[in-house]
Image: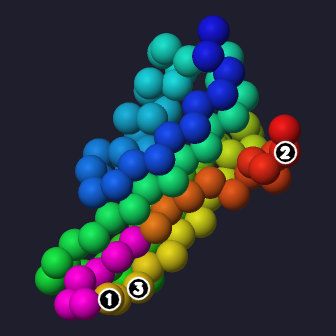
Amino acid sequence: NLQVLSISTSMDNEYMNAQRWETLIITHMPHLRIFDIQHNTSLFGAVINSKTCQDLMNRFATLFWTKRRWFFTHQHYYLERSNHGFFYSIQPYRYKT
């Protein structure tokens, strides 16, 4: 029974599908206690702005996530003609052993 999932991804935005994660966790990982994710993305010419990021954050802030005390934040920035985004977990237990 998986209790801790720590994942670091980049570029594949399918990892940012909150509904898919909810279904996967409920169906296949019901004993999961820690969900630790870090995701980097770079989109040449795409628009990543505060509304886009807020929409993503809202999908990861439903009752499913909050009742488990799994919280997330993001950063976005523009570098070398490309938008970059960084989405990650901010659980209080993240760096504890």
Mark 3 belongs to which amino acid?
Answer: Tyr
Quarter containing the N terminus: top right
State which quarter of the image contains the C terminus: top right
The part of the image, by quadrant, that contains residue 76 is bottom left
Density class for disc 1 (Cα within 10 Å; few <14, some 14-19, many ≥20) is: few
What amino acid does circle 2 point to? Answer: Lys
Gap in Å between the C-alphas at discs 1 and 2?
A: 33 Å
Horizontal side, residue 83 vs residue 91: left or right = left
Marks 2/3 in contact by CB < 8 Å: the verdict is no
* Dot in front, 2 or 3: 2
| Residue for badge 3 | 77
Q: Is residue 30 left or right of residue 23?
A: right
How busy is the neighbourhood of tag 3: few (under 14 within 10 Å), some, or many (20 plus)? Answer: few
Compute the Cα span from label 2 to label 3: 29 Å
> What predominant SS class does the magenta segment belong to?
strand
Residue 2 spot, x, y in % from top left: 62, 16
The front one of 12 and 97 is 97
- Mark 2 nearby-residue class (10 Å; few <14, some 14–19, many ≥20): few
Q: Report if residue 58 is visible in the image.
A: no
**Which mark sits nearer the N-terminus, 1 or 2?**
1
Return the disc, 2 or 3, that comes first in the chain's sequence. Answer: 3
Mark 3 lies on a secondary structure that is: strand
Span shown in magenta: 80-85
For residue 96, which numbered disc appears in the image? 2
**Residue displayed at 78% across by 50% down:** 95
Q: Are marks 1 and 3 in contact (CB under 8 Å)?
A: yes
| Three-letter amino acid code of the residue under disc 1 | Leu
Q: Nearer the viewer, mark 1 or mark 3?
A: 1
In the displayed orientation, state which residue is furthest to the left.
45
Q: Which residue is mark 1?
A: 79
Q: Position of residue 92 (x, y in %)?
A: 82, 52
